[in-house]
Every structure is written in structure tokens, then in C-alpha cells.
Amino acid sequence: GQQLNQSPQSMFIQEGEDVSMNCTSSSIFNTWLWYKQDPGEGPVLLIALYKAGELTSNGRLTAQFGITRKDSFLNISASIPSDVGIYFCAGQIKGTNFGNEKLTFGTGTRLTIIP
Amino acid sequence: DTEVTQTPKHLVMGMTNKKSLKCEQHMGHRAMYWYKQKAKKPPELMFVYSYEKLSINESVPSRFSPECPNSSLLNLHLHALQPEDSALYLCASSQPGLYTGELFFGEGSRLTVL
């Protein structure tokens, strides 16, 4: 099956630093999404990307859908303590029937802010 | 506050018990999902219901039995589970059409099987 390789696995940064993480696949996806999961919570959608080359921002977050449709990156500018958590990329291939379109999640990037 | 509500938050059960996890959403979404998540791993898809019909079963063992009584509710019935089934079980929902990847997750039910 498809695999999404996410890097880095973990990041230790200081507050105020910028963060960059990416996701690569051997398969093409029609949609790329980025989710964040806090401890003891379910994932929350941050950004959704629907077109190759698309660059989308959500506050301090910026994500891009790679031209080849096999990769995506997420940048976080000026990190703050509440950015701590696990970030998952996810890819989806559009099918012909709603309900048969699975999301494939990446392996996750754990972000820690050092005091 | 999440708009997908899961109960219970925590469940401890023995291998011979029968229990159920429940999920409710009131966003009018017509797809609902069960995911299983082990510690430090991404969520793994178990089941998808589309318009209240089971559309995807990811070869999940029969000791897990999903049910979708109506468009707002999703249950996961558990019977004769194994200790390795201990995990966080996440329910999610999404809209039909273009945005099916935009999942709204509940907070999860943390299951421990003794």
C-alpha cells in the first residue's frame, strides 16, 4: 500500500524559531492535508491542499502541495508553546464513489519547544 | 470544543467482556469513520460508513463490529478482545464530495484490554 514518509521524526526548537517539515510518497495523491494532534486528543485539521503547486496559509502556518503530487511541506513561523504536538500529513486519492476514498497518514513529526 | 463526541473517554475491559464505543456528530456529515491509534503511531483506518452503509472494512477482525444506526451515530461493538487491541479509538466524520479528506475527529476512547 501507499506509504507517506514524514521528516523529521522529531524536532526540538526554541520558542520563536521557524519550523519546517515535509512528507514524501512514492504514489501520487489528489489531496494533501496536514493535521495536528495534542496529547489525549484527536487530530485537528490545519490545512487542506487540492491542487498541485498550491500554496496555502493559515495564520503562521504555510503548506504547499508539490508539483509532482508526491510531496508536501508544512512551515510554522515564529513558534509558540501551543505549537507543541504531533503533526501528521495525510494524502488522499479521489475515487469515483464517495465513501471509498481513504486517507493515508504519514508517520508524524513530534514538535517539542525547549524552554 | 470538538463537534464529534465519543463515549466513554476511557474503557477497561477483560478479554471475555462485551462493550461498545459510541460516537455522535451533528454536522450533517454523511461519512463516519473508525480509526485505531497505537502510541506514537499514526491513526489506522478500520471502517468507513457512507450514507449509513459500510463502505470500507480494512480487514478488521470480527471481534470488532461496527454499527451506524443513523446519520449522526456510529458505534463500535467489542467482544472477546485481546490485550494487543488496547489503543486509542478515534471516530471521525466528513462531508460528501470534494472535502472527504477533511475529517473532524473526536477526542477518542482509550481502551485497555486486560
Image: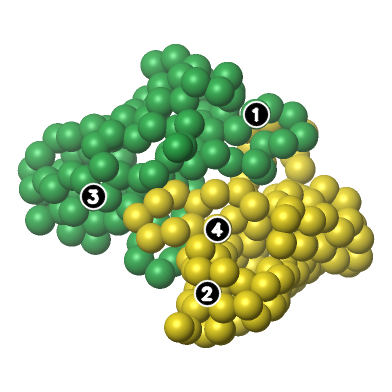
Is disc 1 placed on a helix, strand or loop? loop
Q: Residues within 10 Å of mark 3 (few under 14, many from 20)?
A: some
Residue at image position (27%, 50%) is B110
Q: Quadrant of residue A71?
A: bottom right
Q: In the rendered image, what is the letter of the chain coloured yellow?
A: A
Which quadrant of the figure contains the C terminus of chain A? Answer: bottom left
Viewed as shown, does residue B32 lie left or right of A8?
left
Q: Kindly identify which numbered label has been placed on residue A28.
A: none
Task: Give coordinates of residue B71: x percent, y percent.
Answer: 49, 17
The amino acid pointed to by label 2 is Leu
In the drawing, does residue B114 fall left or right of residue A18? left
Residue labelled with disc 3: B111
Q: Residues within 10 Å of mark 1 (few under 14, many from 20)?
A: many
Secondary structure of the residue carrying tag 2 is: strand
Looking at the picture, which amino acid does disc 1 mark? Gln
**Chain coloured green here:** B
Give me the C-alpha separation between circle 1 and circle 2. Answer: 30 Å
Do tags 2 and 4 sit on the same chain?
A: yes
Question: What's the distance in space between the residues labelled 1 and 4, CA to CA?
Answer: 20 Å
- Give the distance between the C-alpha atoms of the residues marked 1 and 3, in whole angstroms: 28 Å
Residue B95 badge: 1
Which residue in the protein does label 4 denote?
A36
